[in-house]
Image (cartoon, rainbow, N blue to C red):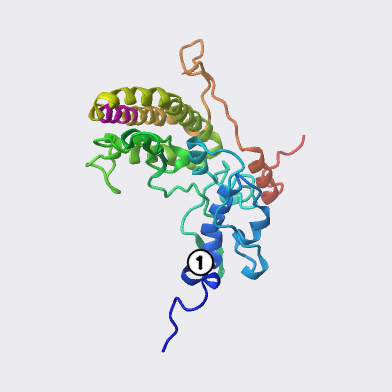
Amino acid sequence: MPARWDDGKDEDFSFRDAYAKPDFGGRRYCDARVWSLFNHFMDMTPYVDYAAGIKPLEECEEMPLWIVPDKKVGVQDVENLMRDHYEGTPFALDGDMGEGIWEMPYRPTPLSFTVDGKKYFNERPVSTQQSAFTFVAQMRSWLPRQVGGIIWFGNDDANMVPFVPVYCGNKMPPACFDDPKADDITYSDNSAFWVCNWVSNMVYPRYSQMFPTLKAVRDRLDNSYAKSQPTIEAEAMKFYANDPEAAVNYLTEYSNGLGADMLDTWHGLAKHLIVKFNDMAEKPESKGRFERSKYGLGATVKRPGYPERTAKRLVETTGNKFAVPTE
């Protein structure tokens, strides 16, 4: 009679080894992402070898299934975890030509590639360009379910978008997240997926040059949503005390309004980026407006050139090919 899957003592059973014993891909492409998130709240240095996936399992300290954070974790903390690219860790995506001229913390798919018969891999950080959507769930049992449950939702790579609050009792989602005219091969100006991808795909190849502008707008919206939350929910609770349906209607209107505002803001950001960074230069701004010369034209553009790390790497790989001759 063949052995049963449940033969043996409970303490000897490993769910992990039975169903998905870690191989290189499982460790480097998946567990390393968990390692990086945990690393924000405790020192995960002892588990680097495990997450790296290079050494045999028996030579590594096994990574914990969960940790107790060293500080209280809020919604915006988790949102920022979803934007992680292994920054400041052994898996960071900087310092090699894969980052391009403008230090992009993204790599193209597929995860592996072959050169001269040898297989190589790309890192897979938490935040990746192929993310269609991302969310953070906030659940508070001490509030009515119509108010206490929120999906903080972003329709693209988390690093490139703000998280819009959508309450679980809402009657309908924001229209920008539910455009019937859009799909994966049909662009629509009313679709958050496509407008957000329009912006992020402008930024990816010129990351260090353009991302700070996107981040400022993203963070402004995130911070405004967080700041408004207590006031909005206090008002919703007033409605709820007399009529729960009125609270649902109020929160639905609020969420849908934020979705429309986010989409409008991202349309504006797309246009701003193409004007500000046209032709790899940078137009100067003052008080939120592009500067003009005394003749009424745009002020002289800034030409930042290569980031320092890129310039050094270019010289290291080309020697004196582009050296200016001395007089």
Task: Determine the residue positioned at 60% across, 59% down.
Answer: 63
Magenta stretch: includes residue 252: yes
Q: Which residue is mark 1?
A: 16
Q: Secondary structure at mark 1?
A: helix
- Point out the stretch of residues depicted in magenta: 247-258
The type of residue carrying mark 1 is Arg
Q: How many numbered markers are drawn?
A: 1
Q: Residue furthest top?
A: 294
Q: Quadrant of the rendered structure where residue 261 is?
A: top left
Location of residue 5 in the rendering, given as x and y in whole percent from the top left corner: 44, 77
Image check: 59 left or right of 214?
Answer: right
Q: Residue at x 51, y 58 (%)?
A: 30
Prevailing SS of the magenta stretch: helix
Residue toward you, 326 or 140: 140
Question: Where does the C terminus fall, quadrant-wise?
Answer: top right
Q: Position of residue 110 (x, y in %)?
A: 46, 59
Front residue of this view, candidates 35 and 162: 35
Q: Is residue 228 above or below residue 48?
A: above
